[in-house]
Amino acid sequence: MDNENTAAKAFSDLEQAEKQLSALDADFKCREAELKNRLEAKRAELAARYSRLETDFAAREKGLLEEIRALKENDARKSVEYEKLCADLAAAIESKQASESKVSQITIGMMELNARTRSAEAALIEKDTEIAYLKRALEEIRPGALKNAITP
């Protein structure tokens, strides 16, 4: 009988162990399903978050590319303006140099004209002096010439 009791007890222990195992298995399957659900929810959340980040990145990238394009256009426009300003400056410098050359030539011409004018003034003064001298000489000679012309 001891063997039967021991066998019955072992069988009972085995049944109880099977029940516990079955309960643990059910608990495990329940937890596994719960964890799978949580994992799927996290995956969905991460996928949505990744999609938002990807969309945000694409929008930012597009904005930056547009900004780069605008900066390149502005740079090209500024380069054209700079080249035009350089050409205008070169033309202005050339015009200034030509004007300075003309002013220099005119100044030299005026200096030559002033020298001629002074020379002419000096010649006129000299001629005026000669004329005055000749007038005085005529005035001195005239009274005597008139006397001589009256008495023939």
Image: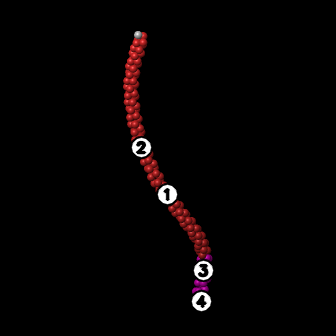
Q: Quadrant of residue 108?
A: bottom right
The residue beneath circle 1 is 83
Find the magenta span and give its range. 130-152
Sooner in the amino-acid sequence: mark 4 or mark 2:
2
Q: Secondary structure at mark 2?
A: helix
> Which residue is drawn at the image coordinates 59% and 71% (left, top)?
116
Which one is closest to the eye, mark 4 or mark 1? 1
CA–CA distance between discs 4 and 2? 133 Å
Residue 127 in the image: above or below residue 65: below
Q: Is residue 144 visible?
A: yes
> Circle 1 sits in a helix, a strand or a loop, which is it?
helix
Tell me the residue at 42%/10% (across/down): 2
Of callouts 1 and 2, the N-terminal one: 2
Secondary element at image label 4:
loop
Magenta stretch contains residue 136:
yes
Identify residue type, mark 1. Answer: Glu
Task: Name the quadrant of the C terminus.
Answer: bottom right
Q: Amino acid at mark 4?
A: Pro
